[in-house]
Structures are given as C-alpha cells and as structure tokens.
Image: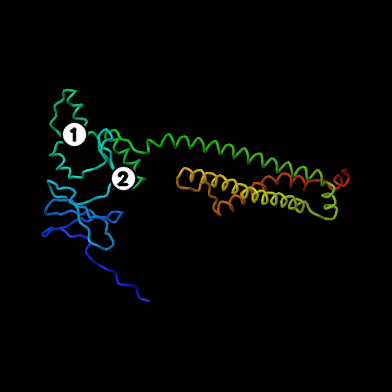
Amino acid sequence: MTAAPAHIGPIASFPPHFFLENLAVRADGSILVTVLNHKQLWYVPAPDGGRPVTPVLVHTFDGCAMGIVETEPAAGFGGIGNGRLLIPQSVAETLRAAQANDLRDVLRGASNSKSTYASLTVRASAASKVASIEKSIKDMGFAAFSLLDATKNLTLIFTIFDSLLAIFGSLALAVATLGIVNTLVMAILERRREIGVLKALGAADRDVKRLFFAEAGVMGLLGGIVGVVFGWMIGRAVTIGTNIYLKQQNLPTTDIFSVPWWLAILAIVFAVIVSLVAGLYPASRAARLNPVEALRYE
C-alpha cells in the first residue's frame, strides 16, 4: 500500500518584487510574514479548501522588521493595551519615549538628560535560577520582585499544614502501636495455659516468641491492606465528587488523589514493620512465662 502524494500549491499571491521573509505560522493555520524591502507586515488567512487566499497588509514600519517573535501579552501602563514592540536597545535610547519615572523627575524638579528606566524585566532560562538571579540583582542595589516572593506566604501556609498533618499522623501511629501492644498482652493473659502446655511439650522460649511475633506481623499485614484499600476508596470518592462539581461549572476535571502501586506496597510494608516493633514486648513477655505457673492459671 503506497501513500498518496502530497499536494503542493500556492496559498496566497503577493505583488511582484516582494521579498518575503520571517514567516510565522499561527495555531489557526494563518501566517504572519514580513516584506523586508517594503518594511511591511502582512497577514495571510488560513487556507480555504486549497484555494489561494488574499493577504492583508497589517502595518508599514518606519524601519526594517527584523523578525517575528512569540511572546505573552503584556498590559501597558495603567493596564491599557496588550501588545509589545521589540526593538534594539540602541534604537530605544534614541527614541527617548516618555516613561513613568520621567513624570516623577519633573515633579521633583530634577533635570537629567541621561536615559533612565522605571523597571527592567529579566527572564531566567530556567525556574531553578530565579532565586539566584533575584539575589544577584538585589546585591547590586536594585529592588527585585518575582513570583517566588508572591508564593512565600503560600509556601509557609503549606509548610504549617504539612507539619500539622505529620503531628496527627504521628499521634495515630502511636495510638495504633499501643493498640497492638494491648491486644497482644491481652492475648497472652487469655492464653497462659496454652503457652504453659506448649512449654511443657518442649517448646523453647524462642518458639513462643516467634509465635507471637508472627501474630503481630499478620495483624500489621491485614491492617495495612485494609487501610490502603479504605484510603483509596475515600480518595476516589472525593475525586469523583469534585469532578462532578467541576463539570457542572464547565471546568476541566482533575485527579485530586493518586495512589501509585509503589506507595501502596510501601504503606503495607511500613504497617508490618510497626506491628513487629510493637510485638517485641508482648512476645518477650510470653516467652518468659513460667510453664508451671502458666498451667495453674485459671
């Protein structure tokens, strides 16, 4: 099976002697193109069914348009306007455009022929370099502001929230450990005769210790599995309920809770380890029981 040959044809026609340069294809299929020798910017609509379209003259510049760059919209002074003009710094200095700090200089009675700027925008090549760049600018004696400054309070709030969750988790872990210890100690009291019989039949202390140690591990294993399943069900219920609300508000859905398989296995293993640690004292206590006294226990 062979693929059909691609069709190549004209999409727009320009007047003769037009030197086209710097083509930028937009998301909707339209094209922005500069005409270098005429210092113009043209707009070519998206192709209509393979038929050529008519280009539209957008703007004629006083100087040469050296290229087309993609940049985010930027509000002008006072929030008015959403466009940017990118020109060389040397050209900008010769234009001597009015700026906000010029008005402050006039009110202060200062006369300075040197070009000054109200602010400068510094773009970092990576988000990890923002903090170091901001520190370097502040060390030079300039005031600097970045999104990291705006998120510091949020970071503090989430840090406090994480600490509270860690405290509650530690309390829950301590209560669970004491519960396991109490359960095994009560099992020893209820099974003293059974322990005495085992020792009378030749069971060593380490055998009794292993028996209760194994029981503690099984308790941790079952508790870990039930806890993971129960937590996953709660997370899914919250996610489904939230997504239903987001759909009603015409907002995109998202996964609020996610439990990867490695986290589930790690939680079960952690539960088993905690149970084994909690079972050390009851297992040692059961191993130290005197078989004669254990057989007399009623």
Give coordinates of residue 30: x percent, y percent. 26, 55
Give coordinates of residue 49: x percent, y percent. 28, 62
Say which element carries label 2: loop
Q: Could you tell me how far apart the alpha carbons at marks 1 and 2 are, in whole angstroms?
A: 23 Å
| Left/right of residue 161 with respect to residue 295 in the rendered view | left
The label on residue 273 is none
- Give the total of numbered labels: 2
Q: Which amino acid does label 1 sit on?
A: Thr
Residue at image x 15%, y 54%? 35
Give coordinates of residue 235: x percent, y percent. 57, 46
How crowded pointer 1 is (Cα within 10 Å; few <14, some 14-19, many 20+) is rated as few
Q: Quadrant of the N terminus?
A: bottom left
| Left/right of residue 205 with respect to residue 142 in the rendered view | right
The label on residue 116 is 1
Q: Name the residue under label 2.
A: 124
Residue at image x 70%, y 41%? 179
